[in-house]
Image: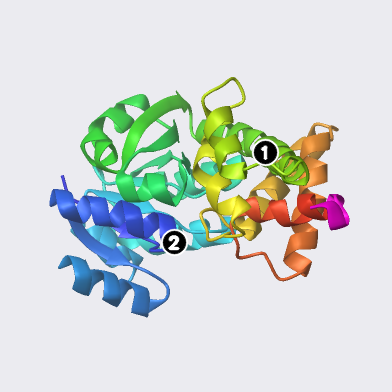
């Protein structure tokens, strides 16, 4: 089974590299052609002349783009080369309505669609250990597992198209709360004059241990905020969640608070840093004591 990848950002490039190493990658495409050319030269694969070229060369097309409109644009561009048996697996984080619209477009051309947002960060994409939250036909998921097993540690079926995005929304709300709690706690620890790397090591082995503390804490206390997962992207995801909540007539304190914090970071020029850059604002709470 051959795969193609559209979107070679930090996450997409990691997934594509694992598929290339497994011998399953047929073609890639990226809106910025330089990224695609550099990737192809490094991994010995073909660059398609557009999304339809990727679909023509592959049984499974993995898409990884940033915004809802980008997903729909790519799916429309795939249509000329879609046919029965072709499967589009979208790993982007978008609204459930967008995933369902994309599925309609793909199915109208004879293909199948899975919404499969991912979690696990750049490390997970690079190491093939991400979790995929999959919405769509369960039999379609089983058919493409030979591809997904190369790029993820777990691909779980969550329900019909849109269920993957709903599950990712749960993940993103939790990630917002964890980010706030970890950054506040570590900022407090600094004011107590503690050896913060030792603090992280000890706490990671106890009840408060978590992925974010383990993978972002050490860099955070050194003042390093390389992405990772960019502030602007988590802010985008939380914006989608806010729209969903508004339809339910609900506001969540965690979401509102972190949106405000992220907007301030973006205004200060830190939007392209990892979300752990929230530590900058939490340290500021303590002023000269930080």
Residue depicted at 79% across the width and 53% down the height: 290
Q: Which residue is mark 1?
A: 182
**Does residue 88 appear in this view?**
yes
Residue depicted at 42% across the width and 72% down the height: 31
In magenta segment, residue 27: no
Q: Which mark is first along the chain, 1 or 2?
A: 2
Q: Is residue 53 left or right of residue 173?
A: left
Tag nearer the camera, 2 or 1? 1
Q: Which residue is mark 2?
A: 74
Q: Which residues are magenta?
A: 285-290
Q: Secondary structure at mark 2?
A: helix
**Does residue 24 appear in this view?**
no
User: At which x and y percent is residue 145?
Assistant: 26, 34
User: At which x and y percent is residue 268?
Assistant: 77, 69
User: At which x and y percent is residue 9?
Assistant: 43, 63
Mark 2 neighbour density, 10 Å: few (under 14) some (14–19) many (20 or more): many
């Amino acid at each position: 089974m051959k795969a193609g990848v559209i979107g070679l950002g930090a996450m997409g490039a990691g997934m594509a590299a694992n598929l290339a190493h497994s011998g399953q990658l047929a073609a890639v495409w990226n809106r910025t052609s330089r990224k695609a050319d550099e990737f192809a030269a490094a991994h010995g694969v073909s660059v398609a002349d557009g999304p339809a070229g990727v679909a023509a060369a592959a049984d499974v097309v993995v898409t990884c783009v940033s915004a809802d409109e980008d997903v729909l644009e790519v799916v429309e561009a795939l249509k000329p080369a879609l046919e029965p048996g072709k499967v589009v697996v979208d790993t982007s984080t978008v609204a459930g309505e967008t995933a369902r619209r994309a599925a309609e477009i793909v199915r109208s051309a004879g293909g199948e669609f899975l919404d499969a947002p991912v979690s696990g960060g750049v490390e997970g994409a690079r190491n093939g250990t991400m979790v995929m939250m999959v919405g769509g036909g369960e039999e379609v998921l089983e058919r493409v597992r030979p591809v997904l097993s190369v790029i993820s540690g777990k691909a779980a079926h969550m329900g019909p198209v849109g269920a993957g995005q709903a599950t990712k929304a749960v993940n993103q709300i939790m990630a917002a709360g964890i980010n706030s709690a970890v950054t506040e706690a570590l900022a407090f620890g600094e004011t107590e004059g503690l050896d913060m790397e030792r603090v992280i090591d000890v706490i990671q082995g106890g009840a408060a241990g978590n992925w974010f503390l383990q993978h972002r804490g050490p860099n955070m206390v050194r003042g390093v905020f390389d992405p990772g997962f960019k502030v602007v992207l988590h802010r985008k995801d939380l914006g989608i969640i806010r729209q969903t909540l508004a339809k339910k007539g609900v506001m969540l304190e965690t979401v509102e608070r972190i949106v405000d914090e992220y907007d301030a970071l973006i205004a200060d020029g830190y939007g392209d840093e990892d979300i752990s850059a929230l530590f900058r604002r939490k340290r500021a709470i303590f002023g000269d004591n930080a």
